[in-house]
Amino acid sequence: MKAAALAVTASLLALTVRKHSAEFAALAGIAAALMIGVLTLELLSPVLDFAEALRDRAELSDGLLAPVLKTLAIGLVTEFGANLCEDAGEKAVASALKLCGGAAAFYAILPLLRSVLDLLEQIM
């Protein structure tokens, strides 16, 4: 609810100010996006707690859960950054960031994929 109120307020502020100062309107949008990002991080805390509880209950090693969480973080940061770039009119930079984020996510999940491959080799 806070994020929605912040988004609407920032959008109305940017719309009102855009005629006089496009730069200030852009800054208002970026500031709102950053504040909403902080609110999002607060929402992710229970998700991380649940993931840790699940890991503990299933007696999984950190090596299995960490790549998944890293990949999730990379995806969120990449999407957030790409959206900011697109809003600033830098679509090429946003596309490059998305490509880099995809590669980084794949790199982060490699340890998990190696574990799956090792497990498959043991089964066969």
Image (spheres, rainbow, N blue to C red):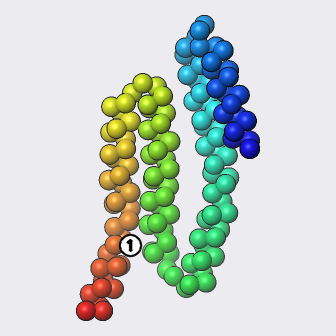
Q: Residue at x 30, y 92 (%)?
A: 123
Q: Residue at x 32, y 39 (%)?
A: 96
Up/down of 4 relative to 104, above or below: above
Q: Residue at x 25, y 92 (%)?
A: 124
- Residue identifier under label 1: 112
Query: What percent of the width, then of the height, locates residue 115?
Result: 35, 78
Quadrant placement of the N terminus: top right
Rendering quarter of residue 23: top right
Amino acid carrying label 1: it is Leu
Q: Residue furthest top?
A: 20
Q: Residue at x 38, y 62 (%)?
A: 108
Up/down of 35 relative to 62, above or below: above
Secondary element at image label 1? helix
Query: What percent of the width, then of the height, locates residue 59?
Result: 55, 85
Rendering quarter of residue 43: bottom right
Up/down of 64 relative to 102, above or below: below
Q: Residue furthest bottom?
A: 123
Q: Label 1: how many residues lie within 10 Å, few (<14), some (14-19) or many (20+)?
A: some
Relative to 73, 36 lies left or right: right
Query: What percent of the width, then of the height, locates residue 8?
Result: 68, 31
Query: What percent of the width, then of the height, locates residue 120?
Result: 30, 85
